[in-house]
Image (cartoon, rainbow, N blue to C red):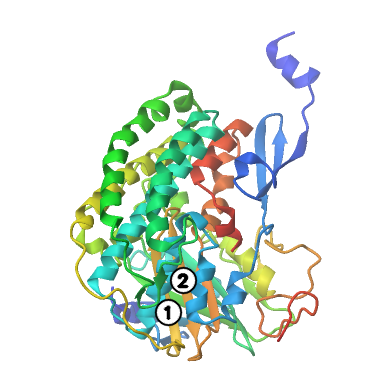
Amino acid sequence: MTNEELQNKIASINNSLEFTEEASEFLNITVNKDDLHKLCTDLKSDTDLSFDYLFCMTGIDYGKELGVIYHLESIKHRHQIVVKVKTEDRENPVLDSVTDVWKTAEFNEMEIFDFFGVKFNNHPNLKRLFLTPDWNGFPLRKDYVDVDNIVIK
Amino acid sequence: MTKDKITNDSFKTQEYFVNMGPQHPATHGVLRLILTIDGEIIKNIEPDLGYIHRSIEKMCERDSYQQIVHLTDRMDYLSSHINNHAVCLTVEKSLELEVTDRVKVIRTIIDELTRIASHTLWWGVMGMDVGALTTYFLAFRDREMINDIFEETCGARLTMNYNIPGGLMNDIHPNFIKRVKEFLVHFRKKLPEYDSLLTNNVIFQKRTKGVGILSYKDAISYGVSGPVARGSGYSSDVRKIHSYAAYDKVNFDEVLFTEGDTLSRYKVRIAEMWESMKIIEQLIDNIPEGDISVPTKAVIKLPKGEFYQKVETARGELGVYINSTGTKNPYRMKFRSPGLSNLNALNQMVVGGKIGDLVATMASLDIVVPDIDR
């Protein structure tokens, strides 16, 4: 399906989504964090869409908000989309886990928790993946300061 | 006393933990696995990562795009040229820079040489892991020839840094074509030896056949890629699906095996070496004339936006995501590493099996730890 057809199809599933194609080759969908899990389940189970391959999962710090970006592809149809979700809560950011939809999300969500501090509901084993459990702060956030290990010139 | 009675009453079994690594020869680098085992049966595996995490993604936010290319060598050091290629393709895509056909063909040839070098090293180590030391020495004999070719042309044997955004750092060495042809003649004779020495060995077959099975459905759900995916019959070759460089101009087959066990992952890699040779043979006599690089500005500034490019490394699908705000550094850079997803599926493959099978299955995943740790 082309990006336009995808947009029409996905808009018929959930009409509160925001679509952009600006400055990206993929169709970008911004979803409210409460609708995330429902949307992901629908995207995978719908036979015309069948987004069964989560090929990249990125955590990102927008400054004010924290976000997670899901790159999805369908093995059957070979079309790709990007789903974005944001949360404004920087103290205790919580999103729904998608490990039950795509199992590959397990390690990726652990990595995002490790570096951005985003917690995922219903994750089977949420803990720091790379850093030690007693590490202070979340290093890939833009406001992270580590006086011992990072020298700012 | 019946047999059942002995096992049930006389022996009490108990689960216990065993550490495998971080300094274990079969974990290929500093990977620590915490095994929960009952006797010899594996109940659960928990990888403990981060021993060589260098936070390359954070460093990228500080560096210019030319500098980032050099950092990517250190991720999956066995396919360093392909990693460089991925970053260069992303930067070129965002700048809408079209490289010359000469660059595309040379990049493709060197990518495939890298793949053969990586697969030969894997073959040697795979043999060693299941107890055949000879394979290690044979593999290094053949890999050495490719390293010599790289040394002459790129000036380095492992971390090549031959790609730059817009082209190549310098032209190929005058000996390059002759040496590559010599290697192909040599390797066409030697690759059948790999089969007669290891593939058809009865002990090897018994250690690998039906061991560590990953089903087609799980392969997709776990997002595995590369030979691990193709061993489960899941067609995932980025070179075919989202073709880049000169791959759309050459004929080659995507190797698929459907059993999903350790042996089929092994066979995929052996067959891929034949396919790589086929690709190089089609291109080596037809390197077009042209410039080796398109001039770029000294300070590369990407336009505002998000850019994504995937390539097929020796281990699977490497993705590069750049979020740019229009400055000379990326706002956020992410590398989708094939190793992390492949390692994620390890639990699925080995739980219920024996520790010896774990070693064989790990070897068939071809894990490079810096690629996972980034």
* Image quarter of the N terminus of chain B: top right
| Marker disc for residue B307 | 1
Amino acid, disc 2: Val
Do callouts 2 and 1 mark residues in contact (Cβ within 8 Å)? yes
Amino acid, disc 1: Phe
Residue at (70, 86) in percent of width and height: A153
Residue tagged 2: B320
* Residue A40 x/y as whole percent: 49, 70
The answer to which of A63 and B39 lies nearer the viewer is A63
A64 with respect to A71 (left or right): right
**Is residue B174 something that shows in the picture?**
yes
Q: Quadrant of residue A49?
A: bottom left
**Position above or below: B177 against B302:** above
Residue at (29, 70) in percent of width and height: B103
Q: How crowded is mark 2: few (under 14 residues within 10 Å), some or many (20 or more)?
A: many
- Spatial CA distance of label 2 from label 1 is 8 Å
Judging from the image, what secondary structure is the residue with disc 1 in?
strand
Judging from the image, what secondary structure is the residue with disc 2 in?
strand
Q: Which one is earlier in the sequence, the residue at label 2 or at label 1? A: 1
**Is residue B216 something that shows in the picture?**
no
Q: Residue furthest front?
A: B174
* Residue A122 x/y as whole percent: 65, 63
The answer to which of B308 and B174 lies nearer the viewer is B174
